[in-house]
Structures are given as structure tokens and as C-alpha cells.
Image (cartoon, grey):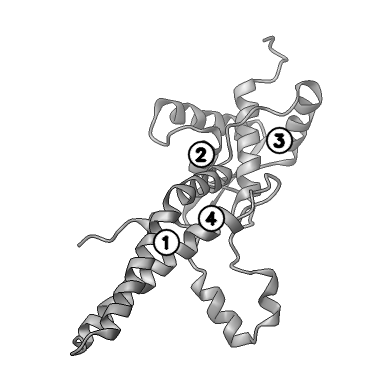
């Protein structure tokens, strides 16, 4: 590489910052350094991360990145000069290669987990429904506390099936051109009365969060 050749690592960091901004759920310019690190595939607490942060400062000094603060946190945004630098590099040699985007990785992992778990979740819900039928037929009937506890179990088991179904069958593969944000809207929502629509959208909260599939501590 001659002194006039673009630095591949700096181009990679610029491309990562640009993609991180494009995928930011805030929709505002500028992203924290940890978001840029995630798009490069570098652990936050590592020697490689420290090297990237040094390059961020160098890119800021060169006018390719802008640095500001948001809510007390330092954020970085690709400037017009940085975009021109990337465009020139892409014309010469193609876009800098980046690892899989975090939002695509989240989709892929959730889809894989759903495929592995959905049958178990269905069996679990089926067992809870059968328990409800058994209790309904019991004579004498169970104490009210039993029903309250079963209500919580049924709700959790049904939500597990719903969440896994969404991740496996309904969550479309993210488009790298924009942020993949679950706005909890569905095409048929407009046909629902307003209050019913709001209630349904509230129930969809967390439907893509596979961390919620873990059993709570007993």
C-alpha cells in the first residue's frame, strides 16, 4: 500500500459507521462506538476495540467523521467527506467487506431458535390446556388460587408459542438498506376498531425477544 492508497481498516470503520447509522433505531445521525464495533464484529473490551477507537479519532481529525454527544454519550457520524471517501473506494475496489449486520444476526438466531423450540412450546401449552380441562372437571373444584396460578402458566405458554411462531413464520428477513424495527403493526390492523388495535399492538411487545423464552427463576 502506497502513501496515497486508502487505508482498508479506516474504510471498513467508515463503512461500519455508515451501516450502524442506517440501522440505528433512533433514526438520528451519529452512533456510539460500541455500535460501530458491533458492525465490524469486534468485542467492546479488547485490544482491537482500542485500536478502532484510535482510528475513530484519526478519521475525525481527517474530517471523515463528526463527533458529538447525545444524552451525555459520545456519538460518531459519517460526514460528507467520509461518504465521498467511501464512494471513491467503492468505485475502485467495491464496498469494504463487513461481517453480518447485527440486525440480520438477530433475525437469523431468532429464526433458528424458533425452529428448535416451537414444538416444545406447543407441547407445553397443550399440557397446560389439558390441566385446565382436568381442573374444570374436578369435583370438588380446586381452590381459586389454583386458577390464578394456572392463568399465569397459560399466558406464558401461549406467549411462547406466539413469539416462536412470529420469529419463524412472520418476521421477514431484514433489508440491509434500513433499520429493522418491529413497529408492532400488521397489514390487517386498519380493519380493527381503534381500542382493539391498540390492545393487539400492546400484546405484540417483545415478540422478537428470544431472551424472554428463558424460564423465570423459581
Mark 2 and mark 3: Cα distance apart in space: 20 Å
At 60% across and 44% down in the image, what residue appears? Answer: 20
Measuring from the top left, give residue 132's x and y in whole percent: 31, 78
**Mark 3 or mark 2, which is nearer the start of the sequence?**
2
**Mark 3 or mark 1, which is nearer the start of the sequence?**
3
Measuring from the top left, give residue 59's x and y in whole percent: 61, 31
Location of residue 87 (image quadrant) = top right
At 41% across and 26% down in the image, what residue appears? Answer: 47
Residue labelled with disc 1: 122
Measuring from the top left, give residue 44's x and y in whole percent: 42, 36
Which numbered disc, 4 or 1, marks the residue closer to the eye? Answer: 1
Secondary element at image label 2: helix
Residue closest to the eye, 148 or 62: 148
Secondary element at image label 4: helix
Mark 3 and mark 4: Cα distance apart in space: 36 Å
Residue labelled with disc 2: 38
Residue labelled with disc 4: 167
On screen, residue 176 above or below 90: below
Mark 4 and mark 1: Cα distance apart in space: 15 Å
Taking 1 as reference, is 214 left or right?
left
For the C terminus, which image quadrant? bottom left
**Mark 1 or mark 4, which is nearer the start of the sequence?**
1
Q: Which mark is residue 199?
A: none
Q: Which mark is residue 82?
A: 3
Does the CB distance between marks 1 and 3 fall below 8 Å? no
**Mark 2 or mark 4, which is nearer the start of the sequence?**
2
**Mark 4 or mark 3, which is nearer the start of the sequence?**
3
Which numbered disc, 4 or 2, marks the residue closer to the eye? Answer: 4
For the N terminus, which image quadrant? top right
Amino acid at each position: 500500500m502506497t502513501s496515497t492508497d486508502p487505508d482498508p481498516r479506516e474504510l471498513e470503520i467508515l463503512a461500519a459507521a455508515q451501516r450502524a447509522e442506517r440501522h440505528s433505531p433512533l433514526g438520528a445521525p451519529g452512533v456510539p462506538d460500541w455500535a460501530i464495533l458491533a458492525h465490524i464484529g469486534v468485542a467492546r473490551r479488547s485490544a482491537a476495540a482500542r485500536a478502532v477507537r484510535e482510528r475513530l479519532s484519526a478519521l475525525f481529525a481527517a474530517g471523515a467523521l463528526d463527533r458529538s454527544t447525545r444524552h451525555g454519550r459520545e456519538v460518531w457520524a459519517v460526514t460528507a467527506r467520509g461518504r465521498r471517501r467511501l464512494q471513491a473506494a467503492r468505485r475502485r475496489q467495491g464496498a469494504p467487506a463487513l461481517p453480518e449486520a447485527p440486525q440480520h444476526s438477530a433475525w437469523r438466531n431468532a429464526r433458528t431458535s424458533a425452529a428448535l423450540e416451537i414444538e416444545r412450546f406447543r407441547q407445553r401449552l397443550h399440557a397446560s390446556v389439558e390441566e385446565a380441562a382436568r381442573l374444570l372437571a374436578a369435583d370438588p373444584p380446586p381452590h381459586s388460587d389454583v386458577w390464578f396460578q394456572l392463568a399465569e402458566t397459560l399466558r406464558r405458554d401461549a406467549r411462547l408459542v406466539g413469539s416462536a411462531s412470529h420469529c419463524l413464520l412472520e418476521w421477514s428477513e431484514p433489508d440491509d438498506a434500513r433499520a429493522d424495527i418491529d413497529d408492532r403493526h400488521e397489514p390487517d390492523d386498519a380493519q380493527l376498531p381503534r381500542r382493539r388495535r391498540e390492545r393487539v399492538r400492546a400484546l405484540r411487545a417483545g415478540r422478537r425477544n428470544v431472551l424472554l423464552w428463558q424460564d423465570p427463576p423459581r
